[in-house]
Image (cartoon, grey):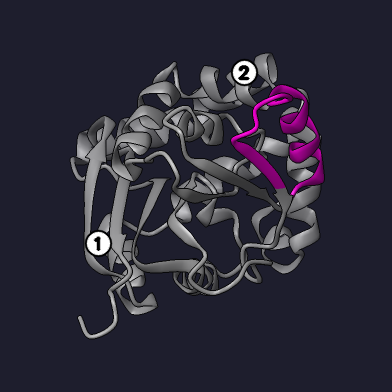
Amino acid sequence: MNKADLTKKPQAVSAMFDQVSTHYDRTNAVLSVGNDQLWRAATVRAVDPRPGDRILDLAAGTGTSSAALAAKGAHVVAADFSPGMIEVGKRQQAGNRNVEFVQADGMNLPFADDEFDAVTISFGLRNIVDPHVALTELYRVTKPGGRIVICEFSKPPAKLVRTGYFTYLNKVMPTLVKLASSNAEAYDYLGDSIKAWPDQKTLAEWMRVAGFSRVAYKNLSLGIVALHRGIKPRTGQ
């Protein structure tokens, strides 16, 4: 399954994630060398969930990130395109009343305008066929004054780090995937999608075009990952 196939066929994206859902969290931990927990904690701090908040966690996968947000007292809607991911997530979060799973297309969200106090997506925006449409949808469902946080792989600004990272993607990661994933072939797309993803400044501009203001980003792990934030302006601002 190559990148071109996935770009043209949204169903292929869903099928790919269905195939890896069984050991998805374990594989993430292995491939990130444990950094996934640090990135998740940074995302939670940036979202700043508060008791009573209604938060959309798009591309939530098995709901690990959603549970971290809900632990702060917010009600989190864990939305994902993959029914396989949702099935695993419902089992893992059974009994967690603050996490609600919904199957949803990121380009056509089944939610009302101005519904969420905050919206967030971690490592999922680049897997949506048209991320510009997804950003517009996220803007639509965010309340005026609400916040967006995007955690995504990015471009390390230092050439030495960037070279080493791409070597990892090309040489090391395929071996680790074979050891950790329930379907190693499904991860063939992962490295290509990361390398093709734009840099920090480009994503920040996409967010501004979608309508968000006060857009800023912070590099994590030397820029391997970047945390983008923004606000939906209130009327008159």
Which residue sits furthest front?
A: 52
Q: Give the spatial CA distance, label 1 vs label 2.
A: 31 Å
Horizontal relation, residue 184 to residue 159: left or right: right
Q: Quadrant of residue 128?
A: bottom right
Tell me residue 200's x, y (percent). 28, 55
Q: How many marks?
A: 2
Question: Which residue matches tag 1?
Answer: 201
Tell me residue 197's x, y (percent). 44, 56
Task: Using the image as rendered, state which of residue 136 and residue 183 is in the foreground.
Answer: 136
Tell me residue 116's x, y (percent). 48, 59
**Residue occupying image coordinates x 81% and y 35%:** 87
Task: Using the image as rendered, state which of residue 212 and residue 3 is in the foreground.
Answer: 212
Task: Using the image as rendered, state which of residue 217 and residue 68 is in the foreground.
Answer: 68
Tell me residue 35's x, y (percent). 39, 22
Q: Amino acid at mark 1?
A: Lys
Question: Mark 2 falls on what kind of element?
Answer: helix
Is residue 97 rendered magenta in the image? Answer: yes
Question: Which residue matches tag 2?
Answer: 26
Q: Quadrant of the C terminus?
A: bottom left
Q: Amino acid at mark 2?
A: Arg
Give, as a single range, the part of the protein colored magenta: 82-101
Few, some or many residues within 10 Å of mark 2 (<14, 14–19, 20+): some
**Of callouts 1 and 2, the N-terminal one:** 2
**Residue occupying image coordinates x 76% and y 51%:** 14
Task: Using the image as rendered, state which of residue 10 and residue 86 is in the foreground.
Answer: 86
**Residue occupying image coordinates x 76% and y 44%:** 16
For residue 185, above or below residue 29:
below
Is residue 200 rendered magenta in the image? Answer: no
Question: Mark 1 falls on what kind of element?
Answer: helix
Few, some or many residues within 10 Å of mark 1 (<14, 14–19, 20+): some
